[in-house]
């Protein structure tokens, strides 16, 4: 079992690097997430891996530990009404307002890609939106991004929220797994992003999705990331959060589940 002092060390590391609020008392959660990373990196146990981190292991190993603790829960079409509102109401209005300029959409904390691919599939099937929307996706974890870019999902993963008609239309069978078609994968531009860093080089976006991340952040980090997301919005832009995420001073958009605007 990981000793309390080691759990506290890991908690402090996650807070310093990514603003994550890691409950050091949840020994099982820490061991279950850190164990696979320790084995992958050649350590006999999570305790040995944390020992290496304490002794100043290289940055790659440090981030491997932090990313494991930030591992998101990802599935297709989670809160389905949110996606349909975005594609059927919000994006058509934005495309009309932007006229000849593409609408920029950023899905951050995208995990292994199911959420942003859900949006991409709806866009691909929406008359008048194909080619009018630029999709960007980011995550803290390099390993999550690698899986997302490959677009390969197990039977279990596609059964979590993916309609059968979309599986048939947009996926190809790959042995026991399924891979998204090149058409859908090529709609995305990917980048590793730590939301604690300066985001100004990425410019602004008409629509930003950051779902089910804010509740994992420590208070100071939460305030910082909320400020970052606000600054990433164009005037009149919209922010889509998880239905249980803290919203701060954001103003909910009427009849739009999980959608917020900057408070007036």
Image (cartoon, grey):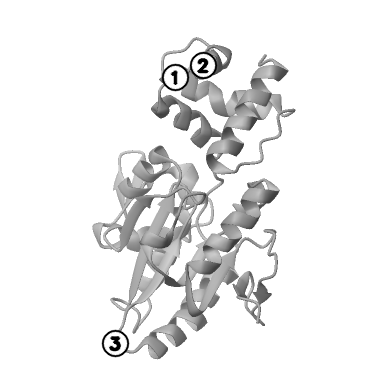
Compared to 242, does 146 lie above or below?
above
Quarter of the figure with residue 147: top left
Point 42% across, 42% down: residue? 144
Residue at numbered disc 1: 57
Residue at numbered disc 2: 49
Give the residue furthest to the right.
25
Quarter of the figure with residue 224: bottom right
In the rendered image, residue 256, in percent from the top left (x then y), is placed at 62, 77
Q: Earlier in the sequence, mark 1 or mark 3?
A: 1
Indicate the quadrant containing the N terminus: top left, top right, bottom left or bottom right: top right
Which secondary structure, mark 1?
loop
Compared to 114, does 229 lie above or below?
below
Disc 1 to disc 2, how far (Cα)?
A: 9 Å
Point 61% across, 23% down: residue? 31
Q: Earlier in the sequence, mark 3 or mark 2?
A: 2
Point 54% across, 77% down: residue? 85
In the rendered image, residue 58, in percent from the top left (x then y), is placed at 40, 23
């Amino acid at each position: 079992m990981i000793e309390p002092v080691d759990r506290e060390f890991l908690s402090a590391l996650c807070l310093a690097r990514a603003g994550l609020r890691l409950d050091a008392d949840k020994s099982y959660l820490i061991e279950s997430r850190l164990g696979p990373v320790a084995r992958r990196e050649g350590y006999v146990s999570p305790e040995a891996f944390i020992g290496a981190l304490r002794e100043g292991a290289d940055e790659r190993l440090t981030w491997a530990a932090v990313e494991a603790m930030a591992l998101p829960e990802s599935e297709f079409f989670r809160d389905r009404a949110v996606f349909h509102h975005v594609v059927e109401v919000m994006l058509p209005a934005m495309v009309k307002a932007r006229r000849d300029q593409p609408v920029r959409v950023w899905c951050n904390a995208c995990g292994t890609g199911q959420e942003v691919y859900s949006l991409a599939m709806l866009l691909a099937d929406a008359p008048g939106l194909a080619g009018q929307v630029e999709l960007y996706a980011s995550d803290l974890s390099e390993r999550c991004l690698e899986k997302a870019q490959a677009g390969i999902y197990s039977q279990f993963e596609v059964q979590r929220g993916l309609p059968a008609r979309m599986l048939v239309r947009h996926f190809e069978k790959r042995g026991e797994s399924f891979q998204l078609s090149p058409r859908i994968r090529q709609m995305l531009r990917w980048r590793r992003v730590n939301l604690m860093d300066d985001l100004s080089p990425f410019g602004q976006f008409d629509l930003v999705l950051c779902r089910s991340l804010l509740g994992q952040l420590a208070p100071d980090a939460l305030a910082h990331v909320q400020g970052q997301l606000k600054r990433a919005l164009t005037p009149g832009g919209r922010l889509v959060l998880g239905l249980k995420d803290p919203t701060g001073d954001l103003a909910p958009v009427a009849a739009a589940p999980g959608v917020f605007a900057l408070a007036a």
